[in-house]
Amino acid sequence: MNPAPMNPAEAADALAAALAAVADPAKAGPMRAYMRDQFAFLGVQKPARVAATRDLVRALPVRDADWLHDLARDLWARPEREHQYVAVDVLARHRRRLEDASLPVLRELVGTRSWWDSVDALAPVIGEAALEHPAWLASLRSWATAGDRWLRRVAIISQLGRGTATDRPRLAAAIEANVGDPDVFLRKAIGWALRDLARHDPDWVRDFVAAHPDLSPLSRREALKHL
């Protein structure tokens, strides 16, 4: 008789156990302090996290998008921050299981227990999945003007790493919607997105910066850092 397939809660428990096995309490305090004491930590840095969970993440019996959503939500609800990092690892590994209906779940994760670490990890997952789900693009454009600054940050940085394939009009619209916002996370995101594109299309970035004198000094400095 075949054993019952692993359900999302069991998968989350297995991943949590793998993290607990390599936890280093001596590292938990400094990791928490680095995140301004907003989250509890087990004390598992990225290399140890990846090594401890890689095989489990790869072998997860992801049946469908709902299974993946339930696992991610379970991990997101756990108090130690490393569980959220593993949730993103799972979503990235099994991104092709996501469906058009997955975007509200990803939006929920962006807006829950939010800080730059989780948001910046989710942004490329969302950006890459959007290439396979064009129906998401209208929503991603609307995020650029959302009330939640973290959704706006995702709208700005979700194309990082796309190089010459970057959708420049979409990037420009996301930046222009936030160019006057004083929030440092948005100003940094604008500069980061422009600096990333500048490696592949420096002329476009130079022209964009020149055409937008209202860019903050931080955004401008980051955009032109390597030009």
Image (cartoon, rainbow, N blue to C red):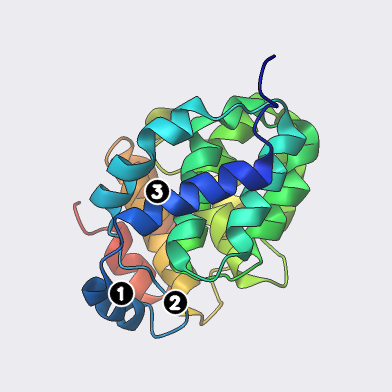
* Nearer to us: label 3 or label 1: 3
The N terminus lies in quadrant: top right
Mark 1, residue position: 28
Q: Is mark 2 in CB contact (under 8 Å) with mark 1?
A: yes
The residue under the point 22% across, 59% down is: 225
Query: Is label 2 in a helix, a strand or a loop?
Result: loop
Task: Report the Cα–Cα distance between label 2 and label 3.
Answer: 17 Å
Q: Is mark 2 in CB contact (under 8 Å) with mark 3?
A: no
Few, some or many residues within 10 Å of mark 1 (<14, 14–19, 20+): some
Location of residue 63 in the rendering, given as x and y in whole percent from the top left corner: 70, 25
As drawn, is 196 to the left or to the right of 145?
A: left
As drawn, is 117 to the left or to the right of 227?
A: right
First in sequence: mark 3 or mark 1?
A: 3
First in sequence: mark 2 or mark 1?
A: 1
| Marking on residue 193 | none
The residue under the point 53% across, 55% down is: 156
Few, some or many residues within 10 Å of mark 3 (<14, 14–19, 20+): some
Q: Amino acid at mark 3?
A: Ala
Q: Nearer the viewer, residue 203 or 160?
A: 160
The residue under the point 40% across, 68% down is: 188
Q: Amino acid at mark 1?
A: Ala
Q: Nearer the viewer, residue 207 or 63?
A: 63
Task: Report the Cα–Cα distance between label 2 and label 1.
Answer: 8 Å
Q: Which residue occupies the extreme left position in the image?
A: 226
Q: Is residue 214 visible?
A: no
Location of residue 223 in the rendering, given as x and y in whole percent from the top left corner: 32, 58
As drawn, is 164 to the left or to the right of 28?
A: right
Mark 2, residue position: 40
Q: Which residue occupies the extreme front position in the image?
A: 1
Task: Report the Cα–Cα distance between label 3 and label 1.
Answer: 16 Å
Mark 3, residue position: 18
